[in-house]
Image: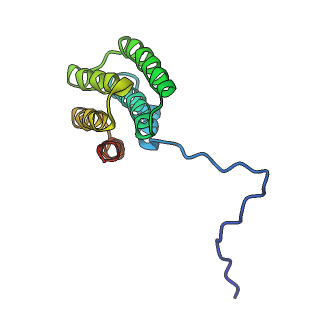
Amino acid sequence: MRHICCVPLPLPPYALSAPAFPFPHLAGLAGRAPIGGAREVALACFVAARLAVDCTDQPSEADGVARSARAVGAKAWLGTLALPVLVRGPLLRCVETSSDGPPGAVGRAVAELAVAGVAFLDAGSVTELESLAVLLRG
């Protein structure tokens, strides 16, 4: 009997590599959760995490301008959501810090958000936020 080995084949020179999707648990929870509190918290945490992950790179002046613009847009959108009071404060701090804060401060804000959102998020989503906080804090 012959066994077929699952060795990945190299990509042809013209092929693009498959993109890695960040925060699949947060995105999945947002898609599965019923309309209302849990979905809005998951979506808001996903947006905050996407803003925070941009702080892991070495920022340039142009990146800082773009991060600030994204944070302003995110704050405006978050203002339209009916978020629980326990989550709203840490969420807004995370978004504000991501605009111009150092990675360590952003990491602390993400960790605070993970603690605040634990009642609304599943274990995988909380783990994604905690892992991001550790990455940012170094």
Q: Quadrant of residue 43?
A: top left
Q: Quadrant of residue 51?
A: top left
Quadrant into which the N terminus falls = bottom right
Residue 28: horizontal and vertical position, in percent? Answer: 46, 39
Residue 86: horizontal and vertical position, in percent? Answer: 20, 24
Q: Is residue 70 visible?
A: yes
Tell me: residue 106, above or below residue 78: below
- Decide which of 136, 80 is in the foreground and name it: 136
Number of dots carrying numbers: 0
Tell me: residue 71, above or below residue 108: above
- Decide which of 97, 110 is in the foreground and name it: 97
- Decide which of 49, 137 is in the foreground and name it: 137
Q: Residue at x 36, y 44 (%)?
A: 128
Residue 100: horizontal and vertical position, in percent? Answer: 36, 25
Q: Is residue 2 left or right of residue 130?
A: right
Residue furthest out toward the front: 61
- Decide which of 95, 82 is in the foreground and name it: 95
Residue 6: horizontal and vertical position, in percent? Answer: 64, 71
Q: Residue at x 23, y 21 (%)?
A: 89
Q: Is residue 46 left or right of residue 130?
A: right
Tell me: residue 126, above or below residue 117: below
Q: Residue at x 36, y 21 (%)?
A: 36
Specify how the rendered protein is coloured: rainbow
Residue furthest out toward the bottom: 1
